[in-house]
Image (cartoon, rainbow, N blue to C red):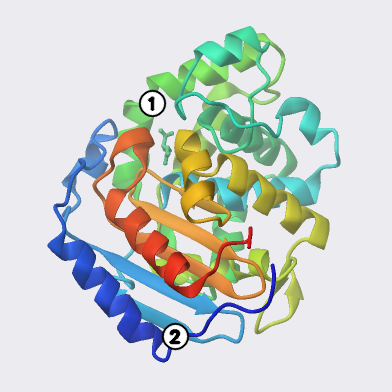
Amino acid sequence: MEGTPKQPKNCSSLLEELVEEARQAPRGGQVADYIPALAEVEPDQLGIAVVELDGSVHTAGDANVPFSIQSISKIFGLAMAMSRTDDTLWERVRMEPSGQAFNSVVQLEWEHGIPRNPFINAGAIVIADVLTSRYSASKTAFLQYVRHLAGKESIGADHRVWESEKQHGNRNAALAYLMKSFGNIESEVSAVLDHYFFQCAVSMSCVDLAKSLSFLANKGVQPGSDERICDARSAHRINALLSTSGMYDQSGEFAFTVGLPAKSGVGGGIVAVVPDYGVICAWSPPLIRFGNPARAVSIITEFAQRLGLSVYH
Ligand code: GLU
């Protein structure tokens, strides 16, 4: 990245302005209802948090309200799995955009049970398999990992969302069994899915998420504590995968308009990593095309464009 991003005079008032503008615009989209417990979320909630590497936290709207992190959990899972494996991991999951829906089954059959990347559901289920086979209690290990990163012991999974997804997770079960038939799932499918649904059901706020993922903006070192969470090569690789696959089938458009490594989740959250600057997290439950949250995309886009944050400058 060339130079440092332009600093707004008052970051929090810029965020307030963007949230207000987004609230005035037509809401559009719908709250995800294929996991019934998610459909109960109040759709007008909207928040944004920016956590800079020097520790400053800027917020607007519902930035401290916990929500279901869903696919954003795939970043934590991947970082944990990369710390317990070597490059053979990339024989089980690839590093290419899928060009298909996040829960698509068709490509997986053509490609012999090897998912395109760790951020589509099939890829994240392979990662969940790595975690269930490498950790004796993978769900507890996952929670400890995110609590430690966010510095917040109260972070937990929403058991209603966890149960709801277990009951309605037939498509994810289909992906897992198909991969098992190709020999790409080691543990029992039920244990792998249990872990996967659990991590998706973890609730965190925009501030929690932006804080906890700050190591990705800082070459693998968590700012503040200076603790190394992953090596610089792993941070680079996670950011590269976020850039090409984190926004599902809208990843190309997001790179084109915003230019930041980012991950969305069907709970309505998006995190965007700004290398050497910090992490932005926005949340708005209703989703539009490709399963991404419209208002959260628009406030991150505005913020990144006004400050010139793109990594492609
Ligand atoms: N738990 C969700 C699923 O498996 C995650 C999808 C997402 O957030 O994009 O369908």
SS for tag 1? loop
Residue under the image location 51 percent in, 48 percent down? 256
Among all residues in the image, which is located at the extreme bottom? Answer: 9
x then y, percent, for residue 300? 40, 62
Q: Quadrant of residue 98?
A: top right
170 to 106, vertically: above or below: below
Q: Does residue 93 appear in this view?
A: yes
Residue under the image location 49 percent in, 37 percent down? 248
x then y, percent, for residue 8? 44, 85
**Which residue is tagged 1?**
169
Q: Quadrant of residue 144?
A: bottom right
x then y, percent, for residue 73? 51, 49
The answer for how far apart the CA atoms under marks 1 and 2 are is: 44 Å
256 to 33, vertically: above or below: below
Q: Nearer the viewer, residue 110 or 289?
A: 289
Quadrant of the image containing the N terminus: bottom right
Q: Does residue 154 appear in this view?
A: no
Q: Which labelled disc corresponds to residue 8?
A: 2
The 10 Å Cα crowd at callout 1, few under 14, some 14 to 19, many 20 or more, is some
Reading the chain from its start, which is encountered first: label 1 or label 2? 2
The 10 Å Cα crowd at callout 2, few under 14, some 14 to 19, many 20 or more, is few
Q: Nearer the viewer, residue 110 or 24?
A: 24
Among all residues in the image, which is located at the extreme front? Answer: 313
Q: Label 2 sits on what residue type?
A: Pro
Q: Is mark 1 within 8 Å of ligand 1?
A: yes
Residue under the image location 66 percent in, 63 percent down? 216
